[in-house]
Amino acid sequence: MNELFEKGAAPAETPGAGRMVGQDIAKGVAIILVLALHTLTLKRSIYTIVGGFFGYIMPFFFFMAGYNHRPGRYTYRQIIARRTKQIVVPFLKYTFAITVIAGAYYMITKGYTLRMVGETYLALLITKSFSTVIGLETAEGLFTCVMAGWFLEMLFTASLVFYAVADYALAKAPRLLSVIPGLLLVTMLCAHFDFRLPFYICEAPAIAAIMLMGAFFGQKQLLGNRFPRRSIVINSLVSYALFVLLAAAFQGAGFIAGGRLWNSTLKEWTVLLSAAFAVTGTYPFVHACRSLRNTGVFAKGLIWCGNHSMQLLLIHGIVQLFLCVLLGMEPFRMSFSANENDFRTIYLLALEIAVSALVILALGQIKKLFDRKSGVKG
């Protein structure tokens, strides 16, 4: 196995190559699936089936966050500064603005107090699982508008761990084979004792391990097209069959949802399942999405969604809230325990994506306008 770690074994593909396009398309499909999960109201039985086929979506995002890492490109300080600018700053800006807008709406219509709004935002920042430990209650309607922010917070906290060990672990096979289990074990111990800390500190080592798996795949370009197509198809079928088998055997355990890695009777073993889903689900998913590269406008739309997945994740909740108000629908009726299908939510999902896209485009134009004015003044 050591030859896999030799320098120059697999040169990185250039941006714009098939691998990069495949990643963007996969991210676009994945974020649409996430929005569908947050919007569609389906019977629990249907949700269970759909979740069983796509339960790797959140591990996929973490896996791909590590995929493009190239050792030695930046110092730890430089890369954390970059990730802070890319993740933390937008997270704080968007979630604060959404809390103010949605909070004002709920204060007017539902009688929420300013304290309820403030505590809900605080619960988001310190993580809801920890806020319940210290007895902090959240206003559920408002929290739902910003709840998707957990992913970015978990990603950043895990990044602090990942970038501290990535270059060391990726240099040699024995290191990688010891660091990944070690990181998983830390989170498994936290899960075993149901130990909770703010900012997803307990979950961060396991997510960093998933990112490290992704970095190894990226180092060897295992999601690219360097291997024969027949091998890719066979490996994808075997990998996806293994994912479905695990998902069916453990009935939903191991699906990362709402920032919780252990929320079932399996406890620590769900951490290992999440890591397994990241690999067995991501490999066939990305290769399947690569086949959509030549679908014209459809592919371009998915690529756009993939490139704006963070913004879509952050704003879709508040967009959905006001769309539901305008359409006279009950907002945020998640499908986890629905007794009947509400097919209106299919149209709601389409509108939600369209309006969210328009908002993102408008914000982009506003930013360009301010940048131009700042340039003139400078």
Image: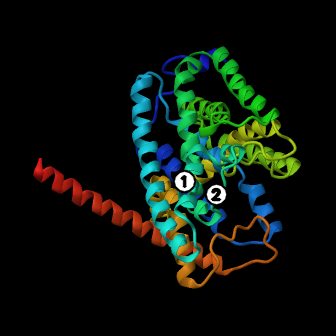
Work out whether residue 162 or residue 9 is closer to the camera in this orientation and state it: 162
In percent of width and height, residue 84 lies at 43, 38
Farthest-out residue, left:
377
From the viewer's side, name the closer residue of 97 and 246.
97
| Quadrant in which the N terminus is drawn | top right
Q: Give the labeled residue for mark 2.
A: 138
Asked if 88 appears above or below 97 in the picture, the reply is above
Q: Residue drawn at (77%, 31%), measured in percent from left and top?
A: 188
Q: Can residue 224 be seen in the rendering of this structure? A: no
Q: Secondary structure at mark 1?
A: helix
Please report whichever mark, 1 or 2, sits nearer to the chain's N-terminal start.
Answer: 1
Question: Residue at image x 61%, y 32%?
Answer: 208
Q: For label 2, count other residues whose C-alpha is less than 10 Å away and answer few (under 14), some (14-19) or many (20+).
A: many
- Dividing the picture into quadrants, the one containing residue 267 is top right
Q: Position of residue 197 (x, y in %)?
A: 66, 36
Amino acid type at mark 2: Thr
Residue 274 appears in the picture as rendered: yes
In the rendered view, would you say 341 is above or below 278?
below
Q: Residue 58 at what x, y percent from top left? A: 64, 48
Amino acid type, mark 1: Tyr
Residue at image coords 46%, 66%: 101
Q: Secondary structure at mark 2?
A: loop
* Label 1 packing within 10 angstroms: few (<14), some (14-19), many (20+): many
Judging by the rendered image, the residue that carries numbered circle 1 is: 121
Alpha carbons under labels 1 and 2: distance apart: 8 Å
Residue that extends furthest to the bottom in the rendered view of this protein: 328
Q: Answer left or right for 376 relative to 326.
A: left
In the visual, does 119 lie left or right of 245? left
Kindly indicate the quadrant of the structure image that contains residue 289: bottom right
Quick check: 174 left or right of 290?
A: right
Q: Nearer the viewer, residue 253 or 12?
A: 253
Query: Where residue 284 sits in the image (x, y, percent)?
Result: 67, 47
